[in-house]
Amino acid sequence: MTAQRDYEIFEAGDVTLQSGAIFPSMKLAYKTYGALSPAKDNVILYPTSFSAQHYDTEWLIGPGGVLDPERYFVIIPNLFGSGLSSSPSNTAGPFPELTYHDAIAVQHRLLTGRFGISKLALVYGWSMGSMQAYHWAASHPEMVERAAVVCGSARCAPYNYVFLEGVKAALTGDPAFRDGRFVEKPTVGYRAMGRVYAGWAMSHGFYRDELWREAGFSSLEDYLVRGWDATFARRDANDLLAQIGIWQRGDISRCAAFGGDLDRALAAIKAHMLLMPGATDRYFDVRDNEDELGRLANAKSAVLHPIPSLHGHRAGNPVNNPPDQAFLKAEIADLLSK
C-alpha cells in the first residue's frame, strides 16, 4: 500500500529560469499549517534548508511554539533539489543550474496564484532557508513585512563557498560519481561528507566542553557515527549536489534588477529585519551580518541579535536544545509584535 502524501504539489508549468533556460513542468512541493485569515494577512513563509524536507523543519511549528499555527497560516515550500520539489532524482534528463531567484519566483507564483496572497507577515528561514528569506525581502519589498534571517546572509561568502567545495570533494570522491553524476549511492562519500560537516557545523567550544553528551552520546566517536555518518545518506546524492550549487550561487544582488550591486539590493529592502546569526557559526559569520546591517538603509527596522550558543550553525535549528529554542522564540515573538 502506498503511503498517503501529506503535502501538496504546485504545478508551475514551464518556467524560464534566471539562466534563460526553460525548465519544463516544474513542481513545487509545499505543506501548510493553520488557517488563512479572511484578510489573508497572517501568512508566514518558512522555506527549507540544505537537504531538508518539510518533515525536518515542522518541529518549529505548533501552538505556543516559535511559529504558532493557531495565529498564523504557515507555508513551508520545499526547495528545489529536496527530492520533493523538482530535483535531479525526480526529473528526467540533465538538471539545470538553479538559483534562489528561481526558487523565489516559483514560490511567489504559488502564493499569488493559488492563495491570492499579497502580503507576508513574516518570511522565516534558517541556513539556506534564511538566504531565501533575504532574497524575498529584496525581490518583493512591498510584499514582505518582516524577515528573520537565522544563521544566514545576503550572499554566499568566499569562506562559505570554500567550505562547500570541501563538502563536494568529500562526496564526489566516492567511486559512484562518474561522468559528472552519481550512478549509485555513494556510501563512502556520504560518510566522508558527514565527517566534514561535523567539523564545521559545531563550534570549538561544543567539542571542548563535550556538549554532545547532553544529547545522550557516550563518546566523541559515538557522536560522529550516530550523529553524522549517515546524516546525508537519506537523500539522493545528485539532489545534494544541486542544492550545494544553489547555495554557492546565492546572492540577492545577482539578478537583472540589481546588476550585482549588493548595496542597491540591500537598500531595496523595506521589511523589519532580524539578523540572527549563531555567535559561533562557522558557515555564516557574524561579521557578514554586521556588514549587511549598516546597508539596510530603508528597512523599517534592522537589528542584529546573535544567538549566544556554542552549538555553532545548529544553534539556528535547536530541535533538542531548549536554551537556543527559547532564544529563537523570544526573538520571533518580538519581531512579530512590530
Image (spheres, grey):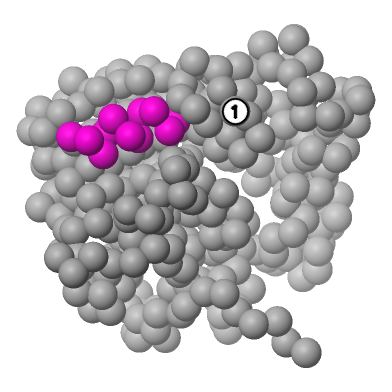
Q: Which of 308 and 267 is in front in this view?
A: 308
**Horizontal side, residue 243 vs residue 265: left or right:** right
Badge 1 crowding class, 10 Å Cα cut-off, few under 14, some 14 to 19, many 20 or more, is few
Which SS class for mark 1? helix
* Residue at x 23% of width, y 50% of height: 121
Residue 91 screen position, x and y as percent: 56, 80
Q: In this view, does 26 lie above or below 288?
A: below
* Residue at x 28% of width, y 58% of height: 43
Q: Nearer the viewer, residue 317 or 105?
A: 317
Residue occupying the far bottom of the picture: 1
Residue 127 screen position, x and y as percent: 48, 40
**Horizontal side, residue 259 vs residue 321: left or right:** left
Predominant secondary structure in magenta? helix
What type is the residue that disc 1 sits on? Pro
Residue 207 screen position, x and y as percent: 74, 16
Residue 151 location, quadrant = top left
Q: In which quarter of the image is the C terminus?
A: top left
Q: Give the range drawn in magenta.
A: 328-338
Q: Which of 229 and 278 is in front in this view?
A: 278
* Residue at x 85% of width, y 40% of height: 226
**Horizontal side, residue 188 vs residue 141: left or right:** right
Q: Which of 134 and 179 is in front in this view?
A: 134
Residue 1 screen position, x and y as percent: 78, 90
Residue at numbered disc 1: 322
* Residue at x 86% of width, y 29% of height: 217
User: Looking at the image, can residue 165 be seen?
Assistant: yes
